[in-house]
Image (spheres, rainbow, N blue to C red):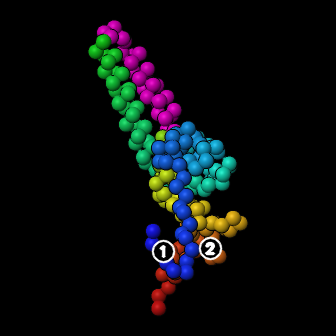
């Protein structure tokens, strides 16, 4: 441990749950931090914060990975099932297969999409991606009664309300000298 004279010991960083635990909690629609609150308010809409522990969840960026994972899994399972049906059963009518397998694929996709997105949110939390690291550092370093700053520029810890001077959208770059 490196020690600087005149400074006290560094605040330990909150390790939080392991990445496997956070992914499993997210898969079960639970908060990746505490495991009590729900991740989703609606089918695929992630809550702003956990209702049990208050951990902010809006930092997630689970864009394309959950559908990709679902398509990958459903495509392999349904594709194997179609292949096995064709190879082993000779008397299955075509109209049945043309209606049954798309319905199975749709049902599996709808059932797996929310757990996959929850797992990705849990993974991002466990790895400290997209603002989750600032939350975990702030939670570990905060003294009792101190305000936790999230550092995301969303106005919660910034007196300017998340607007940096001279940033995009303030019109400063539109004026000619």
Name the residue rendered at 59%, 71% in the picture. Answer: 162
User: Based on the displayed image, in which of its 4 quarters is residue 70 positioned?
Assistant: top left
Q: Residues within 10 Å of mark 1 (few under 14, many from 20)?
A: few
- The single residue placed furthest to the left in the displayed view is 87
**Above or below 76: residue 19:** below
Residue 59, above or below 64 = below
Left or right of 50, for residue 166: left
**At 48% across and 40% down in the image, what residue appears?**
116
Q: Which comes before the other along the chain, label 2 or label 1?
A: 1
Image quarter where the N terminus lies is bottom left
Q: Quadrant of residue 140?
A: bottom right
81 relative to 40, above or below:
above
Residue that badge 2 annotates? 158
Residue receiving disc 1: 3
Q: CA distance from mark 2 to mark 1?
A: 31 Å
Instruction: Locate residue 26 relative to residue 102 in the image: left or right.
Output: right
**Label 2: how many residues lie within 10 Å, few (<14), some (14-19) or many (20+)?**
some
Mark 2 residue element: loop
């Amino acid at each position: 441990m490196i020690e600087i004279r005149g400074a006290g010991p560094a605040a330990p960083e909150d390790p939080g749950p392991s990445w496997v635990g956070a992914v499993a909690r997210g898969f079960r629609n639970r908060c990746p931090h505490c495991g009590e609150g729900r991740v989703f308010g609606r089918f695929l809409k992630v809550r702003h914060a956990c209702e049990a522990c208050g951990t902010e969840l809006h930092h997630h960026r689970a864009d394309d990975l959950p559908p990709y994972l679902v398509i990958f899994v459903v495509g392999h399972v349904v594709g194997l099932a179609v292949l096995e049906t064709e190879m082993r059963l000779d008397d299955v009518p075509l109209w049945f297969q043309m209606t049954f397998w798309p319905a199975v694929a749709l049902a599996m996709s709808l059932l797996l999409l929310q757990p996959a997105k929850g797992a990705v949110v849990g993974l991002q939390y466990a790895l400290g991606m997209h603002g989750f690291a600032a939350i975990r550092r702030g939670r570990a370093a905060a003294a009792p009664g101190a305000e936790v700053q999230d550092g995301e520029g969303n106005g919660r810890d910034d007196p300017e309300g998340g607007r940096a001077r001279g940033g995009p959208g303030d019109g400063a770059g539109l004026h000619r000298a």
